[in-house]
Amino acid sequence: MRHPLSAVLLVALAATPGLAADEDPYLWLEEVESEKALAWAKERSDADTAVIEAVPEFAAIHERLLEIVNSRDRIPTPKIRGPWIYNFWQDADHVRGVWRRTFLAQFVEESPAWETVLDLDALAEDEGENWVWKGATCLPPDDRHCLLSLSRGGADAAVEREFDTTTRTFVEEGFILPEAKARVAWRDENSLWVGTDFGEGSLTTSGYPRTARLWQRGTPLDAAKTVLEGSVDDVSVAAYSDHTPEGRYDLAKLVPEFFRGTDYLRLGERLVKLDLPDDANLRGFFKGRMLVTLRSDWSVGGVTYLQDALLAIDLDAFLAGGRGFEVLFEPKERIALDEVASTRNHLLYTTLDNVRGRLYRLTPHEDGWEKEEVELPGIGTLGLGSTSDADDTFFFTYQDFLTPSSLYLVREGAGPEKVKSSPSWFDATGMTVEQYEAASRDGTMIPYFVFLPKGFEADGANPTLLTAYGGFEVSEVPRYSGSVGSAWVARGGVYVLANIRGGGEFGPKWHQAAMKEKHQNNFDDLVAVAEDLVARKITSPEHLGIEGGSQGGLLVGGAFVQRPDLFEAVVCAVPLLDMKRYNKLLAGASWMAEYGNPDTGDWEYMKLWSPYQNLDPKADYPRVFFWTNTRDDRVHPAHARKMVAKMTDMGKPVLYYENTEGGHASGANLNQRAYTGALTYAYLWMMLR
């Protein structure tokens, strides 16, 4: 029987009967690498993964996922750097990966001749470090000088080391930054913008740099000159340079909270504050113009510019006081701006049109902008790839639930050219995709996609996996997944992707509709989709599971606590759960603009949906599968640990897995990701078949 929402919201906050609300017997699990906490995590993981590995489907799914993630037929994601196409690649022979490169003429061939720039497996072995690749920051236009980010075990904190791509060696006595959640960017060949841990008081309470400094080659790091300084209560401070064909723009930004900040342009030795709304997004510079997108309506210069608009203005005119912006994109109902990029002569942007992608190319002329829509293969999901500043070459990808991802190359004067395609990992014959809407508690219509198996019948008995994210303006769009297709839909499962509020599918307003005091909408939207699936007889509560990670972990954690009658299975990955203490754990303080500050009056609404505090000893919960990573230094593993411990002491059946590596992801390498995926799908088949 359905639980009335009002009853759920009145659940007592005590961890166990008779325990004061401000006490927590599981705080010891917040000590990430304490002997006691690690022993607890290992004992639970060993016992619970053994249960899942015994599910008949596990072995076959695991073998298939290993084949998928290690396939040499995957699309090598290209990054245009100078005359080269770079790619970071992992497979069964390169577990940690290789950074490699080739030329464009070679890249478009079926089997390119790759040159290895850095072998991370060999480096890790030589140095005795568990290195995980976190990317490269290179200096345009030739991209010879690069800073490589190397993480121990996959954490966000990384070591930065200067690398010469011509000699393919680390630079002797080059720039090196010790392990930290650093902010680093090239100014020129001999100077870096740096924000890092300079010792006591140099970080914000969120764990990010409080100062931005300019570091000259050949000088000690401590001698780097401060150019911008924030307070410990800010989220972060950073400085960087936007390198364009027309010149370099030196910038700095102070971020007091997510999606709000102050932008500065450095003119000589002076920082000039840019007169923009504090929630506007500076998108960079193109042909002497400053590009800005808006998160709220802005009235300036006698004109009101709409939320989610893309604006351009000549920078010199703006600095002189002009406010006559050109409107390059204006949102419409259910049409939102997505990505923005540029080539040498064109500005590119994509939109989500009812969660389906479209691509446009703009060319500036003396009398305005010429707009052209770039034709796509279908009505699906596209992603802008790497672009060139030297010419008008760019890449994009296209995919949908049934269509494997394909990589397209666009050159000046030519249409899109398909240059790479991913393999088909499952037989899509007879499979279909539908898009429906469900009315949420306040009447808002929530769209969702349903990926149906061959032979589907609406009889209420279909094993169904519902997933969503709903936070930080992140859009969830249809994608081809060999894992979902082969491990779930090809075996008869239904897969559902919900576009709930909190995401960016319909622009900033969709995100803002689930922030802070409105965050209950997040849970209501997911519940509405679940109930709609039941009403359509696509599934029933006995066969319905939900899955989410990070913010999505908070989402599914809150959903099963509020509506335990509606779900039979829950996959709660690297989750936020204890919202009373989340702002005191790792990067949690940086998300208070999203959720609220539990140390203030915000707790009055947060306590109504915080999963950890609302666990009810009398409720009949599904057997939840929680998983997290010891090396996750973004969302603290204690959220999952404490929830599992608390539910266990309440006598509730739960399953738990903690990987000792991986950071805020499903593993530090492809094999670990395949294992976590196999655990997930085997658990779902165990619970929902």
Image: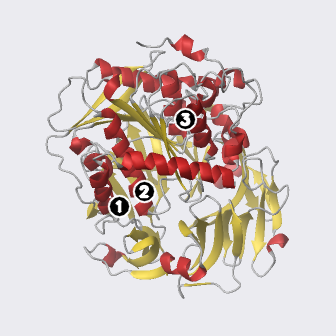
Which residue is the site of mark 3?
Answer: 554
Residue 216, picture quadrant = bottom right
Residue nearest the viewer, comparing 121 with 282: 121
Q: In the rendered structure, which amino acid carries the disc numbered 3?
A: Leu
202 relative to 561, above or below:
below
The mark that comes first in sequence, 1 or 2, is 1
Which secondary structure lies at badge 2? Answer: helix
Query: Quarter-wise, where is residue 180 in the image?
Result: bottom right
How many residues crowd mark 3 within 10 Å: few (<14), some (14–19), many (20+)?
many
Cβ atoms under marks 1 and 3 closer than 8 Å: no
- Residue 95 relative to residue 206: left or right: left
Helix, strand or loop status at disc 1 = helix
Q: Amino acid at mark 1?
A: Val
In the picture of the structure, the residue carrying the numbered disc 2 is: 673
Q: Position of residue 572 (x, y in %)?
A: 49, 39
Left or right side of 427 for 615 = right
Q: Which residue is tagged 1?
A: 69
Q: Does the rendering let one see residue 32?
A: no
Horizontal arrangement in the rendering, residue 61 relative to residue 226 (left or right): left
Closer to the chain start, of discs 3 and 2, is 3
Does residue 140 appear in the picture of this structure? Answer: yes
Figure check: 46 above or below 89: above
Question: Pointer 1 and pointer 2: residues touching (CB < 8 Å)?
Answer: yes
Question: Which residue shows up at 69% across the image and 32% down it?
Answer: 580
Residue 370, image x, y percentages: 40, 50
Mark 2: few/some/many CA within 10 Å (<14, 14-19, 20+): some
The answer to which of 254 and 681 lies nearer the viewer is 681
Q: How far is the residue under mark 1 from the one under mark 3?
A: 27 Å
